[in-house]
Image (tube, rainbow, N blue to C red):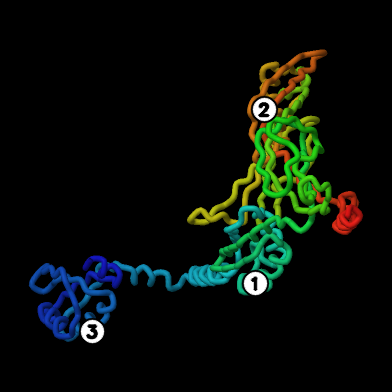
Amino acid sequence: MQKLIQILRGFVWIEAAGAYPERLINLCAQNGISFWKVEWKSETCLRLCVFFQDHVRVQELAARAMCEITVLRRHGVPVFLLRLRKRYALFVGLFLFFASVLVLSRFILVIEVTGNERVGTDAILRELERAGVRPGVYGPSVDTGIVKNRVLLALPDLSWLAVNISGTRAEVIVREREPKPEIVDESRPSNVIAAKSGIITRMEVLAGKAQTEVGRTVLEGDLLVSGVYDLEGAQWSGISLGSRYVHAMANIYARTWYTVSAQTPLAGTGKEYTGKEKMKYAFLFGKRRINFYRNAGISFLCYDKIKERHPFRLPGGIEFPAAMIVERYREYRAVPVAVNRESAEKLLRKKLEEQLALSIDAEGEILRMSFSAQEKNGILSVTLLGECEEQIGKVVELSDGDMEKAPAGEDSSQSQEEAF
């Protein structure tokens, strides 16, 4: 620790030669001047170390001791800085460096968006740019309140947004709006019909009158649950009291079958690379691109373009809004190739399974699948027969014409009077 202090304060090796060098030591002690490493060279000569700031004063005391001081060596930070006192360009550079750091640290370089799941980050960044928040903008000039209102108006799926600017980093925190639940108007009379054909496996009637039963086969559009109740009078009276209308609701599950097919040729066109390549480089800062090439044209007739982006990163992994762009162009020529039948069939099966999964209800289940394949005239055809279980009930509101067909309350009361 003592050595570190000596280096920071600086120290000087001096040699005192004269009649009374020991008196110099006494004078240094009396005046509070620290010294160490005293070495006697002779009766009239000694060496010692003192701090850099005290060596001028030691020379004044040496005159009182009738000694002559010779500076041997100087060490430490003050000595190093003293050597640079005439290098004005260095001090100007240091001033400009710290000034640029203070100024540039107030510009936004990185924008981070957190809290979004359904709304894409790119969409949020586009709206932020339109509101004035983008890499390179002066941070103190950004009005976060105006930015918040503009982005929320442009993106209705967001319910809350906050912009926190800290140095060169702008953190944008968002909260997404919860989707509105589907509101069912139960005041409207309706029926439940079959959205698809199938064999009913399970029925959960919540409101209405069932018109079918488990095990029956229904066709698309058949009535499953009726929203019309016929009100009858006393038993054996034959008197109808009219009808009551309700909003029918039910979960009707049925076994359904699907047949989907797909085709692909077994001969196609492939790529054969010639080995010729061309490279292009560019520098991207924000939205400004600087190309390091003159001719943008490509002499290749057929080629693949491979673009690589190498961003610059700040300490801590933060991506700087600058990147090196490397574009590679590889020439190829088209050649006929034969498609492997097994690979083509496997690909078509996968596509058909995905298509079947999209065709059934979200809560539906695929029970079993069977595939058949045939090749004709160089075309491979694959057919999928799938058996599923899904909810086929569909609510359909009754029109005014449908309700007029049912007996009304006044007609039923009139029929009662005629019966009497």
Q: In the image shown, does 322 or 54 lie closer to the viewer? A: 322
Mark pair 2, 3: CA separation? 97 Å
Residue depicted at x 72% and y 23%: 384
75 versus 227 height, above or below? below
In this rendering, which labeled residue sits more in front, label 1 or label 3?
Answer: 1
Q: Which residue is mark 2?
A: 350
- Please name the amino acid that badge 2 sits on: Lys
Q: Are marks 2 and 1 in contact (CB under 8 Å)?
A: no
Q: Residue 261 location, x and y as percent?
A: 76, 24
Sequence-first disc among 2 and 1:
1
Horizontal arrangement in the rendering, residue 192 relative to residue 115 (left or right): right
In the rendered image, which quarter is residue 250 located in? top right
Sequence-first disc among 2 and 3:
3
Q: Residue 19 location, x and y as percent?
A: 11, 79
Horizontal arrangement in the rendering, residue 335 relative to residue 167 (left or right): right
Sequence-first disc among 1 and 3:
3
Q: Residue 299 location, x and y as percent?
A: 79, 34
**Can residue 382 be seen from the camera position used here?**
yes
Label 2: state its secondary structure.
helix
Q: Which residue is mark 1?
A: 142
Pick the quarter of the image with the C terminus: bottom right
304 versus 139 height, above or below? above
Q: In the image shown, does 381 or 221 lie closer to the viewer? A: 221
Mark pair 1, 3: CA separation? 62 Å
Residue depicted at x 48% and y 71%: 91
Q: Which residue is mark 3?
A: 60
372 versus 66 height, above or below? above
Q: Residue 172 location, x and y as percent?
A: 60, 63
In this rendering, which labeled residue sits more in front, label 2 or label 1?
Answer: 2
Q: Residue furthest left?
A: 43
